[in-house]
Image (spheres, helix red, strand yellow):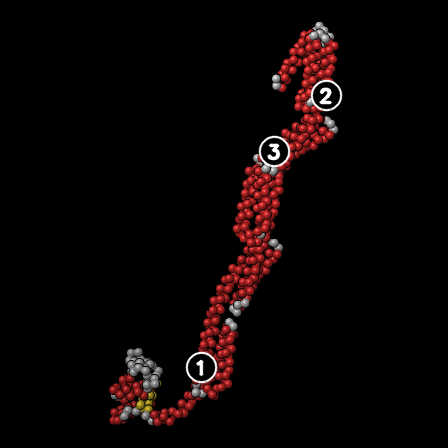
Amino acid sequence: MNISKKRRSAAFAVSMACAVVAVLSCRLEVPIQEMSQAKVSLSRAVEVKSEKYAPDELKKSRELLVASHKSVSDEEMGDAKKNADLSYQESQKAIAKALPLLAKDSLAESKKVYGEADNLYASMYASQSFGNAGKALQQAETLNTGKNYWESHLKSQEALRFSNEAKTASMARIPEVKAEIQRLNREADTLASKRGSEFAQADISTAKSRLSSADAKVGEKNLKSAHSLINEAKVALGGAATKTNRGMSLEKLNAAKKTLGDVEASPMKQYKENEIKQAASLIQGSTSLHNGGSYPQSIAKSEQAIAMLSGISVVLGQKETQIGEEAKNKLMLAENGLEKLNKSEMKDQYTNDIGKVQGLVGKSRNELERKSYRESIASSDEALTIINSVSVAMEKSSEAKKGEAEKGKDDSLQENVREVYIVKLNPRNRDCLWKIAWYTYRNASLWPLIYVANKDKIKDPDLIFPGQKLVIPVAPGKEGKSAEKAKKAEGGSTEANTLRQNQ
């Protein structure tokens, strides 16, 4: 027979005995009080789980109670009272033995579930239930210490109920915690791809390691440890982001400073002086922001300065190319001028000036090689001024000599000059050589005489211009003399005739 059947048999026997007692109590002096007391005590023993903690005492109490009822049936009231008293004593022994153990086990179970709730971070996710569980558990421990075992058991059961509520609420947050771990892992990967691996690889590795451990803790239903590891990962990622931003900020700041240095080193910087000052001010602001830990703002200012300086650099480069070409052209003119002076037959008369020009040309060339374009241009201009001065002096000297040499020749030619004719401006009757020959010689066919005498002024016999002064030579032979006489007869001297024709 198994235990449950035994329990049912014992309970049936007790019930039957009670029925017998009820019947006989009307006729005999039945120990009803003792038997009732034994029955109540036995029920209490069952309530405190004596069947688990004091099975022998509980069994004996039941057997004695059944025996007491049997004695009543046998009308042996003395034995009935004795067995009832013994049953009560045994049930009390069972209660005394079971109750501390029940309180202890209840307290242990409550602590266990409370610990599980704590690991699930119920203090954060189910704070009210978890708080109530903690208070009840503390009271249960106090009652247990004071040997108030039943009250301790009841408080432990209360703590157990609250702990289970807290566990259930916390378990529902597991998907949320997993999602947070996944999000932080993506953040770590993104940071690493955006140069974080250059500036903060150790911190990113630490964060990834903590997140991996946190994921394992979630699998163990230890959300409290997982939360702590997640926070450590966040701190590591924050540090990695700061280091990355600081590194990139410093890199941008140094790039801006270098660009500024390159622009300030340009020989053309004076053309963009105000803009360069503005860029320098931006870099100063970026430096202050960097030193203050405002790295994204510092990066933005550095990039603004770099963009401005890059534009300035392009303009200065174009300006440098332009002035460089000007300097080269000026130097070439000066070199060509110097070469002409050196080839001149009169160079020995201007030795000092030519020496100065040579020195200035050499200086201009050196300055051009050093990209000191403005200085090179100034040296070339100074050389060209001297070259022009010397060239004019040489030309005047040459003309003076030529004039003296040709003076005699001009005097002899002057004897053959008949008059000077000034070409008229008359759109309706334009002057030409054959008309002039007719005016002067009364013979249009003599126009070649005028052309030959004025070949230094007339390049094409069909092209003469108003205001030109043409020499009219004396015509040879009879035509010339008859023409002269005719002109005198007409209107006096040749000079007067010329004036009249040009009116």
Q: Residue at x 61, y 43 (%)?
A: 229
Q: Which mark is residue 93?
A: 2
Q: Give the labeled residue for mark 3.
A: 167
Residue mark closest to the camera, 2 vs 3: 2
Residue 439 visible:
no
Q: Which mark is residue 323?
A: none
Give the alpha-carbon distance from disc 3 to disc 1, as whole Å.
104 Å
What type is the residue that disc 1 sits on? Glu
What type is the residue that disc 3 sits on? Lys
What type is the residue that disc 2 sits on? Lys
Q: Residue 282, percent across and down?
A: 57, 59
Identify whether 414 is placed above or below 106.
below
Q: Residue at x 53, y 52 (%)?
A: 194
Q: Residue at x 46, y 74 (%)?
A: 328
Residues marked 2 and 3 touching at CB (< 8 Å): no
Residue mark closest to the camera, 3 vs 1: 3
Give the alpha-carbon distance from disc 2 to disc 1, as whole Å.
138 Å
